[in-house]
Image (cartoon, coloured by chain):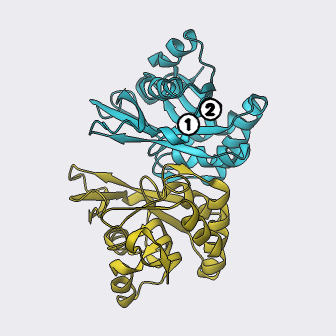
Chain colours: A yellow, B cyan
């Protein structure tokens, strides 16, 4: 999506450790007009998939996911991050490794909000090692629901999480795919 | 706002310790159509305030705040929760006490996203003891910006955080104000 690539070129900042800072428009301050345009693009890509639920993960996926839910006229669920194992049995759970902060955490979704008739579109801001996306896919499988695919704002293609998940059969549509970020210069695929 | 009160009556669940669960439409699964309607109501209430930024706090305020930002055609910022004191000097920070989980945490907003010319509308899903709202107000003051007020989905009026902050001069507009939740029955003001 040219609009997003241009924005990343203009306002993105490359930091040590392959960190791309886009917090002026994507994940701290949010350009909601851009979010609306990205949601329209995801609608164009997935509109024939009979999406019944949009699933994202807190916190930075929520804003974009809400506009996607508006486009598909369906509820949006955000998986919650938790450090305490939930043993109540009323949630689906999966483990996620954090690329940005290191370590692992669990994500949970209440069972009552996902069921076997759901056709779920995953939305997230970043795809790097693919751990969050893999965790969300696990939760959809646990629920017996169908994953129609994932809509990602920015994929760091050089970290190959997307390759692995595509090889497992997950449809992934990334609006901007970064091939490399060497010496502070961002190259798109 | 009658629509929200009816929804709370229908789908809200009262739990021990004055906890109101609204996670089927507000803060886990999200009814984005309702969010759009709530955003229109906040626009009606604050449209003459020349709002330049919407400020919320992760995670459950983000969805609603994004639609409010769309209504006002301005950027939305979410304050990030952190447990590590940021000493870089490039963020505004405030301490917040958690009503739901106990304990305290810091919230931060990067200095580059708030400045003295900003007129800021705070948006959050809940107002109980007022600690989050107070923290967000502190950050606006630190930035030298103007707070035009706060738009809240659900105020637990019996916990009096709203009273205290209104007495300090903050304009607060709550779309649903709960007077009591005794024996599982929700009474609105």
Badges 2 and 1, same chain: yes
**Considering only vertical position in the picture, is B62 above or below B121?**
below
What residue is disc 1 on?
Answer: B114
Residue found 26% across the figure and 39% down from its top: B84
Kindly indicate the quadrant of the structure image that contains residue A10: bottom right
Question: Which chain hosts label 2?
Answer: B
| Chain letter belonging to callout 1 | B
Badge 1 local density, few (<14 within 10 Å), some, or many (20+)? Answer: many
| In this view, B20 is above or below A35 | above
* Viewer-proximal residue among B21 and A85: A85
Drawn side of residue A144 relative to residue B151, left or right: left
Rounded to the nearest angstrom, the CA distance separating label 2 from label 1 is: 9 Å
Residue located beneath label 2 in the image: B120
Q: Is residue B56 left or right of residue A114?
A: right
- Which secondary structure, mark 1? loop
Q: Is residue B136 above or below residue A111?
A: above
Q: Nearer the viewer, residue A187 or A75?
A: A187
Mark 2 Cα shell of 10 Å, populated few (<14), some (14-19), many (≥20): many
């Amino acid at each position: 999506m040219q609009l997003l690539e241009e924005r990343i070129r203009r306002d993105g900042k490359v930091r040590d450790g392959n960190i791309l800072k886009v917090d002026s428009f994507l994940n701290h301050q949010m350009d909601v007009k851009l979010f609306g345009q990205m949601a329209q693009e995801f609608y164009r890509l997935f509109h024939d998939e009979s999406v019944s639920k949009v699933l994202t993960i807190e916190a930075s996926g929520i804003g974009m996911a809400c506009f996607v839910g508006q486009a598909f006229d369906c509820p949006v669920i955000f998986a919650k991050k938790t450090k305490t194992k939930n043993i109540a049995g009323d949630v689906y759970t999966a483990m996620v490794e954090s690329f940005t902060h290191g370590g692992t955490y669990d994500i949970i979704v209440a069972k009552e909000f996902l069921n076997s008739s759901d056709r779920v579109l995953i939305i997230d801001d970043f795809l790097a090692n693919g751990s969050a996306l893999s965790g969300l896919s696990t939760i959809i499988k646990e629920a017996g629901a169908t994953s129609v695919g994932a809509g990602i704002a920015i994929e760091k293609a050089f970290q190959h999480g997307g390759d692995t998940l595509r090889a497992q059969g997950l449809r992934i549509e990334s609006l901007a795919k970064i091939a490399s970020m060497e010496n502070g210069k961002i190259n798109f695929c």
